[in-house]
């Protein structure tokens, strides 16, 4: 009996067997916009948030995405381990009704320490450029073009192709965020969708980027 | 039985405030260290090697007492050397802030520090723990990274180790089996898992009246 009591006492006092105390780190990041986007028309799927978390003490970086309806807040939670410093990058795509505005935040000094803490941060509008393209075709001018963000598979608004003559047309896609890779999709005259997979669209600079593609063989050129 | 009870009681004492949450791996040999009054104390016939955040290695010789604290702006912890001998391997961008009663120093590179009877001496590069050659110790820190990652891999892949979850407040459950695993320098591996964390991100919808 005496031995049993000792054994029970050891189990209760051993940190190996009792439920760990609640020393979870809870960090809440409250974000706001540097300027409020101008909403021209409410759209059902109006925002998309992509977040990545990395750190030297983590085995691998983590990524999470969430999308939502107009009027709803974006809430996203990473379950990880305490420690730091951690790098967090956020990309918030917001569809105003006409264009997709891209807002970003990046921080590399997050420490997840036991306890509760709340940090406020500001999303900044990502630098943008305009993609000006020329398409060559044989069977008639394509109907439209649009960009797909390769990382999130998010499609940006379509742009119309303006025929120049019977063999060429041009298009212009404004508000393309810098620093991201896109795939250019084309809806051709037969209503089929084809893609220029060999020429991912990317620019790290603002201004304009020229694209030239041939729908006959999907060959393409970027500077 | 009383001794065992006393040992476990010491091991499960709450940690000092600021106990780092990101300690990763402990490799030890000999008698197990005990945590006492916020200090970590090694027995006379032991040593302990701490690999922290994949970046710094801190080795404690036998009969050594230290107090670990959270590093400020560094992945490596701050340390207060109470007595004994420690070796610190710290990269330039993640130094160890070392203090002792009466002084302090920022440690970068490979440095051995001894405090005996209140007197502190720095020996520069040099091994503390047995089985580690001088040649390894004098390597630049960045070269040691390969060795550190190798130790980490070995620690997590050998099945004859006891991987244990920490209890609350950072106290440790130590592997008291005594069986030496084939890890690193034939040490027994002990792992301290950092506490869980949740990072919640909130982006309010940009509410605004349409123009």
Image (tube, helix red, strand yellow):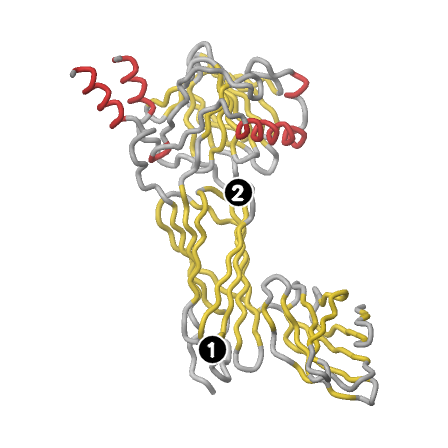
Based on the displayed image, in which of its 4 quarters is residue B110 positioned?
A: top right
A110 relative position to B166: left or right? right
Which residue is at the front of the view, A174 or B108? Answer: A174
Q: Residue at x 47, y 87 (%)?
A: B211
- Give the residue at mark 2: A58
* Picture layout, residue B191 above or below residue A137: above
Q: Output the chain of dot 1.
A: A
Q: Which secondary structure lies at badge 1?
A: loop
Name the disc covering residue B153, or none: none
* Picture layout, residue B149 above or below residue A36: above
Based on the displayed image, in which of its 4 quarters is residue B200 positioned?
A: bottom left
Which residue is at the front of the view, A173 or A141? Answer: A141
B36 relative position to B98: left or right? left
A223 relative position to B113: left or right? right
- Where in the figure is residue B82, as x and y percent of width and height? 42, 20
Q: Are marks 2 and 1 in contact (CB under 8 Å)?
A: no
- Where in the figure is residue B204, as x and y percent of width and height? 42, 68
**In this rendering, the label closer to the viewer, 2 or 1:** 1
Name the disc covering residue A44, or none: 1
- Where in the figure is residue A184, as x and y percent of width and height? 70, 72
Q: CA separation, marks 2 and 1?
A: 36 Å
The 10 Å Cα crowd at callout 2, few under 14, some 14 to 19, many 20 or more, is: some
* Picture layout, residue B80 above or below residue B73: above
Residue reaching furthest top?
B45
> Quarter of the image containing the N terminus of chain B?
top left
Q: Which secondary structure lies at badge 2?
A: loop
Of mark 2 and mark 1, the one earlier in the sequence is: 1
Q: Residue at x 76, y 83 (%)?
A: A170
Q: Is residue A165 visible?
A: yes
């Amino acid at each position: 009996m005496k031995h049993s009591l000792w054994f029970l006492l050891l189990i209760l006092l051993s940190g190996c067997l009792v439920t760990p105390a609640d020393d979870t780190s809870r960090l809440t990041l409250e974000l706001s916009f540097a300027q409020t986007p101008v909403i021209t028309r409410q759209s059902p799927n109006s925002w998309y948030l992509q977040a990545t978390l990395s750190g030297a003490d983590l085995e691998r970086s983590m990524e999470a995405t969430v999308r939502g309806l107009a009027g709803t807040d974006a809430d996203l939670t990473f379950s990880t381990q305490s420690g730091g410093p951690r790098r967090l990058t956020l990309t918030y795509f917001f569809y105003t009704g006409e264009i997709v505005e891209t807002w970003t935040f990046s921080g590399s000094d997050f420490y997840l320490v036991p306890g509760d803490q709340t940090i406020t941060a500001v999303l900044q509008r990502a630098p943008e450029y305009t993609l000006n393209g020329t398409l060559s075709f044989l069977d008639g001018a394509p109907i439209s073009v649009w960009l797909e963000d390769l990382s999130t598979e998010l499609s940006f608004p379509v742009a119309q192709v303006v025929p120049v003559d019977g063999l060429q047309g041009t298009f212009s896609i404004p508000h393309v965020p810098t620093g991201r890779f896109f795939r250019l999709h084309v809806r051709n005259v037969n209503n089929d969708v084809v893609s220029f997979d060999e020429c991912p669209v990317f620019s790290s600079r603002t201004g304009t980027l020229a694209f030239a593609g041939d729908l006959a063989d999907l060959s393409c050129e970027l500077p | 039985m009383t001794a065992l009870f006393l040992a476990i009681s010491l091991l499960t004492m709450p940690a000092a405030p600021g106990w780092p949450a990101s300690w990763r791996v402990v490799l030890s040999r000999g008698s197990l260290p005990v945590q006492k009054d916020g200090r970590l104390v090694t027995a006379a016939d032991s040593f302990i090697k701490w690999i922290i955040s994949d970046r710094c290695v801190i080795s404690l010789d036998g009969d050594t007492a230290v107090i670990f604290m959270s590093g400020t702006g560094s992945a490596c912890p701050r340390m207060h050397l109470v007595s004994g001998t420690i070796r610190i391997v710290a990269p330039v961008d993640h130094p160890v802030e070392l203090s002792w009663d009466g002084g302090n120093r920022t440690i970068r590179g490979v440095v051995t520090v001894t405090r005996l009877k209140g007197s502190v001496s720095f020996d520069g590069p040099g091994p503390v723990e047995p089985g580690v050659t001088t040649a390894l110790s004098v390597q630049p820190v960045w070269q040691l990274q390969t060795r550190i990652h190798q130790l980490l891999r070995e620690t997590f892949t050998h099945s004859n180790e006891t991987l244990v979850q920490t209890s609350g407040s950072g106290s440790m459950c130590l592997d008291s089996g005594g069986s030496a695993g084939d890890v690193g320098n034939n040490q027994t591996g002990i792992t301290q898992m950092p506490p869980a964390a949740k990072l919640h991100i909130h982006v309010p919808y940009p509410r605004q009246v349409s123009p």
